[in-house]
Image (tube, rainbow, N blue to C red):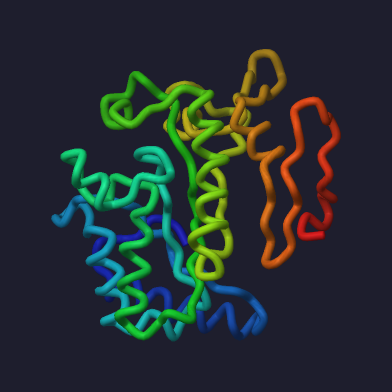
Amino acid sequence: MGRVCADARGYVDLLAACSGAIRAADPDAIIISAGLSPTGNDDAIARRDDLYLQDMYDAGFQQYVDVVGAHAAGYDAPHVGPDDAVAKGRQRWMSFRRIEDLRKIMIANGDAARQMALLEVGWTTNPNNPDYSWYAVTEEQQAEYMREAYAYAAEHWRPWVGLMSAIFLADVHWTEDDEQYWFSITVPHLDMGYISLRPAFDALLRMEKVCGDFIVPAYPPDQMQTPLDPYNPCG
């Protein structure tokens, strides 16, 4: 589901209606709640993500979903946790591992058996936008951090994190004026009619893949052909 208001109870009412319709059409569908974006706001603009999640539990949202959605924005290196962010003079949400705080809320609400899905995982490379430049990385850092993020999750977050969706494969119409352009692992060149690859694309392609208990090992730069079956990446 897309962007929602700061009223968690209103969102859960909407979720209940959508969930009922989805279940009626496809009883086997897996329903994921809208991804919670890390934020320090707690005002008319936005509700802080951990508070919003508790508000959702208070409104009974878990009966309408199979998986809890969240965003794991790349505010720092993947190993940096919420406590580390505070030690650096930042806030807890300014870390890739912010979702560990959200996981504690799930456990406190008796929901430990439910998985989380990370619907956005990525790092911006935009050095110019004042809203994002404070955590921008180079393209080489983006590649390394993306690889490290999946490795960290495989070691520390299984099985309670399942899906991790890397952002983005660029829309061909995106330009440098679009925020998404800088997070993308591909670069559109509409005027020239093609899309080029950032280092992060190759890093994700070559990294070790974990799908349940099935592991596809990483492969070296001199191996050109991916060992993955694109129609069945889990083996």
Look at 37% across and 68% down and name the residue there.
Answer: 103
Answer with the quarter of the image where residue 46 lies.
Answer: bottom left
Look at 25% across and 52% down and name the residue there.
Answer: 83
Count of numbered badges drawn on the protein: 0
Residue 85 place in picture, x, y as percent: 25, 45
In front: 32, or 101?
101
In front: 3, or 159?
159
Q: Is residue 65 above or below residue 116?
A: below
Look at 64% across and 76% down and name the residue there.
Answer: 29
Residue 69 place in picture, x, y as percent: 45, 64
Residue 193 place in picture, x, y as percent: 71, 19
Answer with the quarter of the image where residue 123 lies.
Answer: top left
Look at 28% across and 45% down and name the residue there.
Answer: 94
Task: Please give left or right for residue 41 compared with residue 206 in the image.
Answer: left
Task: Please give left or right for residue 11 compared with residue 34 in the image.
Answer: left
Task: Please give left or right for residue 9 compared with residue 64 in the image.
Answer: left
Residue that sits furthest to the top in the current view: 192
The C terminus lies in quadrant: bottom right
In front: 65, or 235?
235
Residue 121 place in picture, x, y as percent: 49, 47
Q: Is residue 70 above or below residue 196?
A: below
Q: Is residue 149 above or below residue 63?
A: above
